[in-house]
Amino acid sequence: MFARTLQKGSLKSSGGTLSAPIGNAKGMARQITVYLVPATSNTRTDASRMLGNATRAFPEDTPMEDVMTHLLRHWNLDWEKDSAESLTPEHISLRLFGNVGIQPHSTAGSLGNFFSIHDRIYGNNPKKMLQGPPTLKLPSPAIYLEGLILVKEYEDQTGAQAPYFVHTEKEIRKRKLSATTGNVTSVVKRTRSQLPSHVFTPLRSEIGDLPGFSKVLFLFATVSVARDGAVNIIWPDFTATPVACTLQDTPLGQGKTKKVFKAIYDGMPWVAKRFFDIGTGEEQVEIHENSKFLIQEITRLAKSGYYLEHFVAEAKQRGVSIDETISVTDFKLGIEVVQDGASPSLASGVSLDRYQDANTNSNSKLLWLFEPRRSARVDHWSGTNDYPAWHHKKLGSTLNAFTHYVYHLTQESIVLADLQTSTAVNEHGDGLNVLFDMMTHTSNGASGVGDHGQEGIDTFVQSHECVDRCDGLGLSKEGFTKALKESGESDEEEED
């Protein structure tokens, strides 16, 4: 737990924004990167998967309490969706990599002091307690920390119930049973600090165990968007030296069409996605089909980022209040490199014979969509053909207006659908709601999986309900009737 004592002269944060100076080589405070991953004393909970990691560089004279308060903003984006109170540093017990305890009272001072204390003790240790897992390459100086969430202390101090994902399924059932009998008891009997040392269990970290991962070689394409919104993909030099990434052998999860695998790229956690079902059955997707649909998916993402940039600029120009936490996911288009004598990765689901046949016939590429790892918690704001107005939710109503704006910007030829967000934190520590895996309906019906063509556009036109932000942006449904009429006349002509 954290002591409240601050160093004399230390710089206290205000409103969660650190105002300490940025360091450089001319006598200013150096920057130290802190990488924090969530953990619980029980490895069978979903805390790591749901909360994700938090990382940022801080000036070394930043109080450790401020460092933790700032990093916990990332966890609280999802924690507060399932609990009435926020996590604070008092609810976290810090450990170094490998389940190594920190030095007593070391959190009472600055980050620089905390780092120096542990660097003197563990800096040359071959187990790399400060650097974290070998696949994680943090900029130096840096320190890897695992934050053990003290569930009982949290519930006792705040009177709030901790989110379901910090409990095991057995504990959740016990809590429900206790609630129905009117005898609600604490789910966690003893915290890690109360357990004798001989029963300590390894903490679950964001990276997970290295068994079940493979080294896979990739080259990455460059994706750009022109001023008119056209998306351009520049393929890499295939004679270049590929990048070695760590890729999970079995999927972390899957949706209706894509499987998702953990990946480590450039020392940081990402996910890699590929199509496994496009309506012809599971794992019946040919290599060239996966390539086609992934390129369409990336084109959607790139265009959505372009549309969002214009939407935000238009809102600012007109003085319309919108939710400015919205962003479109970062992404990379990866080409898996299969060297002579090697086989495709286990994650690809492609055998060597199948890969060789595909390359003989069409020189097909094993493509992957890479995205930074985010919280596993997903909020849905629209469906494939369902467009709620969300009058009383700023994020939802902003996305409602954004959908209307894109329809207008593209001259009524594109409708965004299936909008969903997950939370993340940018390099400045600001919370983001990240759009990903969105669909589009287009007039030619050729934008990718889930495109219902003009029928999908007509469904939006019929069901869209404008919000105040639509009015503020000068958008209305006046032109919708005309669009529906023209669509109806076209259908009648085809029937004749």
Image (cartoon, helix red, strand yellow):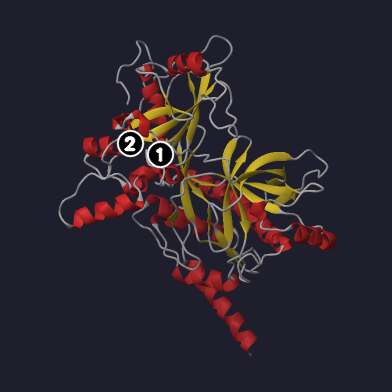
Q: Position of residue 269 (x, y in %)?
A: 56, 40
Please identify the residue farthest to the left as the structure is shown: 182
Q: Position of residue 405 (x, y in %)?
A: 52, 57
- Can see residue 230? no
Q: Position of residue 286 (x, y in %)?
A: 71, 64
Rendered view: 293 above or below 145: below
Pointer 1: residues within 10 angstroms few (<14), some, or many (20+)?
many
Given the image, on which type of amino acid does mark 2 rest? Leu
User: Which residue is the site of mark 1?
Assistant: 75
Rendered view: 429 above or below 114: below
| Distance from the alpha carbon under mark 1 to that under mark 2 | 8 Å
Mark 2 falls on what kind of element?
Answer: loop
Please give the name of the residue rendered at 72% of the width and 52% of the height, measured from the top-left corner. Answer: 344
- Can see residue 249? yes
Quadrant where the C terminus sits is bottom right
Given the image, on which type of amino acid does mark 1 rest? Trp
Pointer 2: residues within 10 angstroms few (<14), some, or many (20+)?
many
In the rendered structure, the answer to whether residue 393 lies left or right of residue 462 reads left
Q: Nearer the viewer, residue 3 or 41?
A: 41
Q: Nearer the viewer, residue 393 or 265?
A: 265
Count every numbered label the image shows and give the total. 2
Q: Position of residue 253 (x, y in %)?
A: 52, 55
Quadrant where the N terminus sits is top left
Q: Nearer the viewer, residue 236 or 39?
A: 39
User: Which residue is the site of mark 2?
Assistant: 87
Mark 1 falls on what kind of element?
Answer: helix
Q: Nearer the viewer, residue 80 or 479?
A: 80
Q: Are marks 1 and 2 in contact (CB under 8 Å)?
A: yes
Residue 142, numbered label: none
Please identify the residue farthest to the bottom as the structure is shown: 496
